[in-house]
């Protein structure tokens, strides 16, 4: 393999030869049309024979010609030797100067996969005029596009034609053809999304084959649970029978006509403890925001309004919630369908459904959206369980909370944090009224209400008739989100109960040393970036620097479980069946509730196995292990690839997390944002994009964040190369080439700020390379006016 990077090899320009000689301007002088002499005497004699007859005048004319020929020969040979020497000097110096960029191929399985991926994607340096017009999502619109996708409106642009072919505008029928959906699906599969990458990695962990006895029993149970979730044939065969059996354990219900009335609070406590079902209120575990500022780590039980099954809407004029009358008929039909599938008598269906909707409506009136409760100061109200009992007497609060957080010991003097106390008071009144309606069977409607909430909890473990009914209602209510693949649903369900198992397995597969190294290098480059900003005042700079210097950035690991033996002991009472997902799911609910109880007593924050973004906890900046999973990160990748992908994402997350209001603190943000935008408009304005529009402050900040994140990643990588000069490569690309190309593969990562980005992040490579010697080659477009002089951003 050549030591010279591929992109640095000179490109020969071959001109067409079909033009006439005079037009090409390459006709040689007459002197060079003569045959050059050689050292062969015969040739010399032959040449003499071809000369005209000698005469004194002719001999005197010939002598200067031979002298001129010799001089020209000497000049030609001398020039050739000088050029050769200069070429050798240049090659030597070129090799010397680019010794750091000498590429060593990486042949690991992960690198082979990455190489195949890169070869099937656009290289920004091979297609400099097209790549920055790539659209991440069909519905992702530029703020100034008037509803058009980025890249549209550029006449004759090849990328624009490809986008139209992939995602045609649905102006008439609004229906995609199957072929178009397939192409769109293939395009979206190439987008590296962090959450999707993590779930795929967890899937590989759960589907990996292990020899009997080679892994812990807890790991085997997690894998059996996952496989039983995938076994839809057994789930369909079981039908509704598992849930009907569960109802009988609760004493039956009035809908079936076979019901042994039970105590309301006893049934409620049982649902909360064993089935993680909360029909009338929600329970959380968390800290008090008022205490976090003082460094307190104590956690509290938090009581909030429930997630009601009935569709409701907020009336901003009346300042109260109400049932959506236009969707009530649809909800009524779905409830009737559920009862039919559970074998209820059609003659009684309407009566029971009517009471369920009536009770749900009365509870819905007292609910309120978060923004309203926040404005009214109805969040985090500290109250003792005794005080709560006096305000909402229909619920046995101490008994219910003891059941939910068993085996923890609670007393009436323990504090809880209450959210939306008006709802809790109203809920108690409504339940008290329904429990005392003697014209009905005592507590029958309330019990039916609780059973239908339990049905909603266990519905993921029932046959497809139930999920289809739920999906049809959601679609009718305007939910356009498509159903997730079955494997993804099963990964998420497995994590709910076996999160400790997956946390340990994820820790074993994470390259801790490499992850820690890139975290520290990016964080160091981030701190140096702060000094480059022009701050509006020194107070802002000092405040931010004090905060940053106090932070310790590290990989977020957990100390909950230290050995497989502890895991096996923890899950020793869990019996996972291979062909009964419903029974496995019931055990999962119990495990989920025990996990909630553990959160109440733990001092350290448990690592979230499904987290893919960093978290600020006190003076620690924690990066979860889920960020460092293939294909986004791998310890065998070239460091250039890891910095181009994960380095950029880490830098972007840090900037968002630590500098959320940087636009108001530094004039650099506006200047850089507008500078990058000017580069973009230098192309867009000349290709039919229309009138230039200035960026909003939020857009300026997001452009600055992503541009700075790429700069930080480049700086951190260059520092890494100084410390460890050896690095591998993929596809023969030089280090910087590979870093920037890898970045272009992941710049569609979705985060809460992506809607503020007015241009495709890939275009940032053009801006970086416009005035920099870092890039392997120029990104000038011959048919675009990119040569216009623009300032360095």
Image: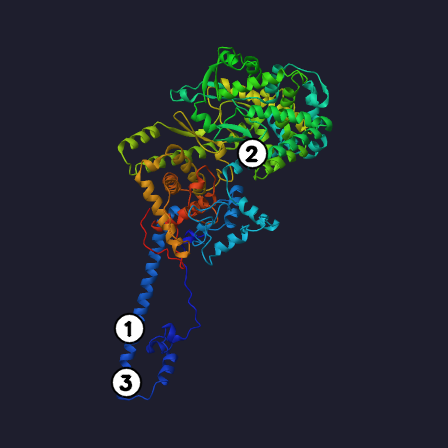
The answer to whether 377 appears left or right of 250 in the picture is: left
Residue 57 marker: none
Q: Nearer the viewer, mark 2 or mark 3?
A: 2
The image shows residue 528 at horizontal and vertical percentages of: 32, 36
Q: Which residue is mark 2?
A: 202
Q: Closest to the observer: 245 or 631?
A: 245
Of the pair 381 and 638, the residue shown nearer to us: 381
Q: Which residue is mark 3?
A: 59
Judge whether 371 appears above or below 175 on screen.
above
Precedes in sequence: disc 3 or disc 1: 3
Return the x and y of residue 195 as percentages of the image width and height: 51, 36
Residue topped by disc 1: 71
Callout 2 secondary element: helix
For numbered disc 1, what is the local secondary structure? helix
Q: Residue at x 49, y 39 (%)?
A: 632
Whichever of callouts 2 and 1 sits on the residue coming sooner in the sequence is: 1
Q: Is residue 27 left or right of residue 596?
A: left
Residue 303 visible in rendering: no
């Amino acid at each position: 393999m050549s030591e010279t990077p591929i992109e640095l090899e000179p490109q020969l320009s071959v001109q067409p030869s079909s033009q006439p000689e005079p037009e090409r301007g390459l006709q040689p002088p007459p002197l060079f049309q003569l045959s050059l002499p050689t050292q062969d005497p015969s040739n010399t004699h032959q040449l003499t024979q071809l000369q005209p007859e000698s005469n004194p005048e002719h001999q005197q004319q010939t002598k200067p010609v031979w002298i001129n020929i010799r001089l020209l020969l000497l000049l030609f040979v001398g020039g050739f030797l000088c050029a050769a020497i200069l070429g050798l000097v240049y090659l030597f110096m070129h090799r010397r100067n680019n010794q750091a960029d000498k590429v060593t191929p990486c042949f690991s399985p992960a690198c082979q996969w990455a190489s195949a991926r890169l070869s099937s994607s656009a290289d920004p340096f091979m297609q400099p005029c097209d790549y920055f017009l790539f659209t991440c999502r069909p519905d992702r619109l530029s703020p100034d596009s008037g509803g058009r996708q980025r890249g549209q409106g550029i006449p004759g642009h090849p990328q624009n034609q490809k986008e139209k072919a992939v995602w045609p505008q649905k102006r008439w029928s609004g229906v995609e053809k199957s072929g178009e959906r397939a192409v769109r699906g293939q395009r979206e599969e190439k987008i590296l999304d962090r959450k999707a990458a993590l779930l795929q990695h967890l899937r590989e962990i759960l589907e990996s084959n292990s020899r009997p006895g080679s892994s812990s029993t807890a790991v085997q149970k997690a894998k059996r649970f996952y496989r039983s979730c995938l076994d839809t044939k057994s789930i369909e065969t079981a039908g509704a029978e598992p849930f009907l059996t569960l109802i009988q354990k609760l004493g039956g219900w009035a809908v079936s006509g076979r019901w042994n009335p039970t105590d309301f609070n006893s049934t409620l406590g049982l649902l909360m403890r064993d089935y993680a079902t909360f029909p009338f209120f929600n329970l959380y575990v968390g800290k008090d925001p008022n205490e976090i500022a003082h460094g307190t780590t104590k956690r509290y039980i938090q009581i909030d309004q429930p997630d009601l099954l009935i569709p409701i809407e907020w009336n901003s004029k009346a300042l109260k919630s109400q049932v959506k009358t236009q969707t009530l008929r649809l909800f009524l039909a779905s409830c009737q369908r559920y009862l039919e599938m559970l074998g209820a008598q059609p003659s009684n269906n309407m009566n029971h459904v009517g009471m369920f909707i009536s009770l749900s409506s009365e509870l819905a009136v007292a609910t309120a959206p978060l923004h309203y409760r926040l404005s009214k100061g109805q969040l985090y109200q500290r109250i003792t369980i005794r005080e709560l009992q006096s305000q909402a007497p229909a619920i046995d609060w101490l008994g219910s909370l003891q059941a939910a957080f068993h085996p923890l010991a609670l007393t009436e003097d323990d504090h809880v944090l209450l959210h939306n106390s008006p709802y809790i008071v109203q809920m108690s009144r409504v339940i008290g009224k329904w429990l005392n309606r003697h014209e009905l069977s005592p507590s029958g409607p309330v019990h039916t209400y609780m059973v239908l909430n339990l049905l909603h909890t266990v519905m993921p473990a029932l046959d497809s008739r139930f999920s289809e009914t739920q999906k049809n209602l959601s679609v009718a209510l305007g939910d356009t989100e498509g159903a997730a693949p079955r494997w993804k649903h099963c990964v998420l369900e497995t994590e709910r109960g076996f999160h400790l198992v997956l946390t340990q397995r994820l820790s074993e597969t994470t390259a801790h040393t490499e992850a820690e190294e890139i975290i520290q290098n990016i964080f160091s480059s981030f701190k140096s970036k702060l000094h480059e900003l022009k701050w509006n005042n020194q107070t802002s700079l000092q405040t931010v620097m004090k905060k940053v210097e106090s932070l310790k950035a590290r990989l977020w690991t957990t100390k909950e479980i230290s050995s497989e033996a502890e895991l096996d002991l923890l899950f020793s009472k869990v019996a996972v069946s291979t062909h009964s997902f419903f029974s496995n799911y019931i055990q999962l609910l119990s495990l989920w509730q025990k996990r909630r109880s553990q959160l109440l007593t733990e001092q350290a924050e448990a690592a979230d196995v499904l987290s893919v973004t960093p978290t600020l906890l006190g003076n620690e900046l924690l990066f979860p292990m889920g960020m460092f999973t293939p294909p986004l990160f791998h310890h065998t990748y070239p460091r250039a690839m890891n910095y181009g992908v994960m380095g950029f994402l880490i830098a972007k997350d840090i900037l968002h997390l630590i500098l959320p209001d940087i636009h108001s603190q530094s004039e650099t943000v506006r200047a850089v944002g507008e500078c990058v935008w000017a580069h973009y408009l230098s192309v867009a304005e000349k290709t039919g994009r229309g009138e230039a529009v200035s960026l909003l402050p939020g857009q300026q900040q997001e452009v600055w964040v992503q541009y700075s994140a790429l700069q930080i990643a480049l700086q951190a990588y260059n520092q890494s190369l100084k410390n460890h000069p050896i690095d591998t490569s993929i596809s023969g690309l030089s280090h910087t080439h590979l870093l920037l190309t890898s970045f272009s593969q992941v710049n569609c990562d979705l985060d809460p700020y992506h809607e503020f980005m007015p241009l495709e992040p890939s275009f940032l490579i053009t801006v970086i390379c416009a005035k920099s010697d870092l890039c392997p080659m120029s990104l000038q477009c011959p048919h675009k006016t990119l040569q216009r002089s623009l300032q360095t951003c």
